Amino acid sequence: MLADIGSAELAEWQAYERLTGPLGGARGDVQAALIASTIAAVNRNKGQKAPKVTDFMPRWDKGAVRKSPQELFKIAQMANAALGGGFNSTTA
């Protein structure tokens, strides 16, 4: 899919996702967590605190190594190049 769309269209899809919520698998994780928290809430003991939806959300970033700003910039440059973008070294 990424080979068929330009960076402008990709940016539009990213903006759309920020407005409407996650697309694809991430949305499914939220939906499953909502159902699980509802089932847990109705089956809890009296006086027991109701679980939160976030209690059932998978954490995909566990153990992820934090990257430095320089590493993130290099990754962004590689993604830009992979999408056919260029690099303008002049400053405005």
Image: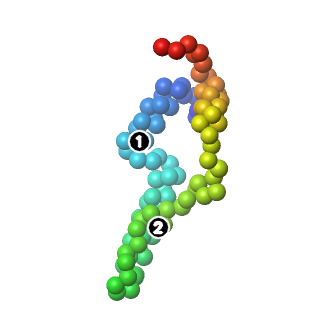
Secondary structure beneath label 1:
helix
Tell me the number on the disc at residue 69. none
Q: Which corner quadrant of the image does residue 63 belong to?
A: bottom right
Q: Label 1: few (<14), some or many (≥20) within 10 Å? A: few
Determine if residue 2 is in view. Answer: yes
87, 18: nearer the viewer: 87
- Where does label 2 land, which residue? 55
Against 44, residue 25 (above or below) is: above
Against 91, residue 36 (above or below) is: below
Q: Is residue 70 left or right of residue 6?
A: right
Against 72, residue 53 (above or below) is: below
Secondary structure beneath label 2:
helix
Determine if residue 83 is in view. Answer: no
Image coordinates of residue 9 in percent, x first then y, are 48, 28
Tell me the number on the disc at residue 18. 1
- The amino acid at mark 2 is Asp
16, 57: nearer the viewer: 57
Against 86, residue 45 (above or below) is: below
Mark-to-mark CA distance, 2 and 1: 22 Å
- The amino acid at mark 1 is Arg
Image coordinates of residue 42 in percent, x first then y, are 36, 78
44, 76: nearer the viewer: 76
> Residue at position x 45%, y 47% from top?
22
Q: Label 2: few (<14), some or many (≥20) within 10 Å? A: few
Image coordinates of residue 87 in percent, x first then y, are 60, 19
> Residue at position x 59%, y 15% from top?
89
> Residue at position x 54%, y 25% from top?
6
Image coordinates of residue 49 in percent, x first then y, are 37, 78
> Residue at position x 40%, y 68% from top?
52
Q: Earlier in the sequence, mark 2 or mark 1?
A: 1
The quadrant of the picture occupied by the N terminus is top right
